[in-house]
Image (spheres, rainbow, N blue to C red):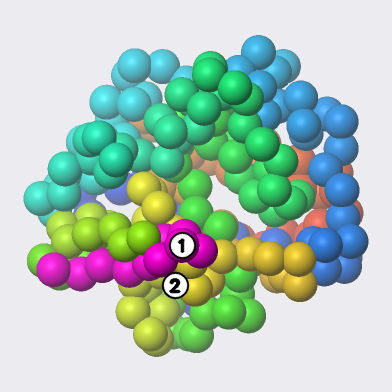
């Protein structure tokens, strides 16, 4: 389902999730909400080693993962430390919980709002897209991204607004942007991620690798 251009440091894992009903009808469990706090009882914890490895992956194409362009997992950690990560919906809450504690950036795309074929490669210099409802734009030149038929739509920093989930979403595509230097960490994060989703009645199906 996804064609991935070779990348020397990227350990990518991707899977489809089918929810039993639209996200607007689902509620995150108390256990999941607890995981949106840094002190949540999680089987994984982020570290400086993880953060450095992820940044190295994103630098490969010339992108600078610093400041407002730092990996999404780092943003989640700072948010958790300052005020706690807010609940959005089951799909995003699961993603944020795993990303926060594993230290790995994760993208979640509404499959029905995207257009196949899907592929992953480094975005050309000058590439950009809108990433929030207010119309703010991120420059993604040099950053490894997920593309659909209409162009780039997700990456380890900020996902495109046009393919984000909403209350009508029933099927998502998740991508975990891991690093080969972290060995089995991406696989472990994926397994935990699947477990949390399944606890909310969802079905998961691997699509890459």
Mark 1 = which residue? 134
Residue at point 11% right, 66% down?
125
Residue at point 44% right, 84% down?
117
Find out whether residue 128 is within the magenta segment.
Answer: yes
Instruction: Tell me residue 129's x, y (percent).
Output: 33, 68
Secondary structure of residue under mark 2: strand
Residue 44: image quadrant is top right
Mark 1, other Cα within 10 Å: few <14 / some 14–19 / many ≥20? few
Residue 196: image quadrant is top right
Above or below, comparing residue 25 to residue 195 in the picture: below
Secondary structure of residue under mark 1: loop
Picture disc at residue 79: none
Instruction: Tell me residue 46's x, y (percent).
Output: 47, 21
Stretch of the chain drawn in magenta: 126-135
Above or below, comparing residue 1 to residue 182 in the picture: below
Find out whether residue 84 is within the magenta segment.
Answer: no
- Of badges 1 and 2, nearer the viewer stands 1
Q: CA distance from mark 1 to mark 2?
A: 30 Å
Residue 124: image quadrant is bottom left
Given residues 117 and 128, the one toward you in this image is 128
Query: From this viewpoint, which residue is outermost toward the front?
Result: 134
In the drawing, does residue 42 fall left or right of residue 134? right
Above or below, comparing residue 36 to residue 111 in the picture: above
Residue at point 53% right, 19% down?
82
Mark 2 = which residue? 2
């Amino acid at each position: 389902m996804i064609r991935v251009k070779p990348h020397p440091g990227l350990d990518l894992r991707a899977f489809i999730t089918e929810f039993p009903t639209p996200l607007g009808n689902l509620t995150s469990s108390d256990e999941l909400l607890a995981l949106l706090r840094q002190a949540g009882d999680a089987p994984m914890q982020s570290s400086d080693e993880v953060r450095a490895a992820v940044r190295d992956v994103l630098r490969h194409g010339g992108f600078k993962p610093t400041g407002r362009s730092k990996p999404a997992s780092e943003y989640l950690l700072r948010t958790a430390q300052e005020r706690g990560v807010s609940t959005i919906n089951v799909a995003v809450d699961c993603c944020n919980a795993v990303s926060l504690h594993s230290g790995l950036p994760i993208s979640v795309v509404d499959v029905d709002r995207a257009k196949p074929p899907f592929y992953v490669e480094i975005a050309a210099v000058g590439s950009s897209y809108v990433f929030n409802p207010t119309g703010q734009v991120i420059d993604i030149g040099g950053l490894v991204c997920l593309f659909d038929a209409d162009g780039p739509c997700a990456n380890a920093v900020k996902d495109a607004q046009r393919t984000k989930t909403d209350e009508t979403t029933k099927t998502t595509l998740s991508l975990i942007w891991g690093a080969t230097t972290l060995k089995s960490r991406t696989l472990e994060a994926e397994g935990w991620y699947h477990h949390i989703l399944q606890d909310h009645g969802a079905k998961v199906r691997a699509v890459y690798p």
